[in-house]
Amino acid sequence: MDGLPFVGEGGFDPAAFEAYLALRLQHRPDLARVQLAGLVVSSALALAGAVLVLVRLGRRRTVPPPPGPPARAGWGLGLVAALVVAFPLAAVLAGALAAPWAAAEPPRAGPPAARLLAGALALVLLAAGGLAAAGRAPRGLEPLGLGRGPAGRVLGIGLWYLLLAFPFVMGLQLLSQQLCDRLDWPRLPNPAAALFLTTGRLLDLVLVAAIACVLAPLAEEVLFRGLLYLPLRARLGRTGAIVASAALFAAVHPPVDMPAVFALGVALALAYERAGSLWAPIAAHAANNLYTVGTLLLQRHLAYG
């Protein structure tokens, strides 16, 4: 898509995109009604989450403590340090795997899809390598709770904690965006969102959705709530590990998204603590990203419909 008014020399501009949508909605009542429906759905989810938080606070003394994952895994922070050192090698290998996609990719104003694919593949390679190394440790991968499969109760726990966190995630995201605009700080866009909102290829849309809803939840939860969280829990305790892992999770996202991602990271760690299985935060992460993809689809309709 050439000549987009919200794509400048510096790439996709989120503030310019929002201004462009606002201008279109002034002249398109039909699109304004679609936007209102989306806002109603988001507000309903936030309200439901807020009600659940209040109910849970009222019952906190009667709820038994969660069983949680094992207090100690068979691997330590040395494995995490090794994965950090191995990241450049994983990035090079992922770039080679994504090279055919880059060769077939047409010139575009937005971010290249091959770069997004290479980043996702690098995370997958790190997660796979980390699982292979952790599997050789005493007790293997048992502390992650992956062997039991994604049972309905475990998945339900993940979605429950996501709904509890939803009002905090939404509120912090809106607050962060408003603060950046008021202080005239540049809002660095999420590469996946920028590609999704600027591409004209269906294949790119499918790629972003697959990365966001499948690859990213699996790889990031293995890395942050699995291989990293358990050694941190052994050293810092439950609360310290939740805060530290959420902070590190937020640090690998764009600055404007960091507060909301931190809140999401806390909820994902709590889901892991409650379920004792990594499938719970994987399900919550995938559902959160699915909601984000749905929001991006709505924005595409408002921009091009």
Image: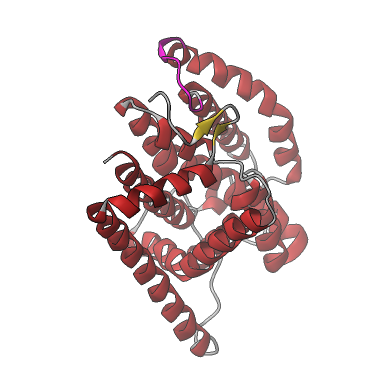
Residue at the extreme left? 30
Position of the N terminus, as image quadrant, is top left
Residue 86 vertical placement versus 296 (above, below): above
Which of the 4 image quarters holds residue 140? top right
Residue 149 locus on image (x, y percent): 38, 50
Does the stretch in magenta take in 45? no
Residue 188 locus on image (x, y percent): 61, 41
Residue 200 locus on image (x, y percent): 34, 27
Closest to the observer, 212 or 157: 212
Residue at the extreme front? 27
Please indicate whether residue 69 sits to the left or right of residue 36 in the image.
right
| Residue span colored magenta | 103-111
Task: Examine the rendering and report whether any part of residue 141 can be seen.
Answer: no
Residue 174 vertical placement versus 20 (above, below): below
Closest to the observer, 296 or 227: 296
Residue at x 57% of width, y 28% of height: 122
Which of the 4 image quarters holds residue 20? top left
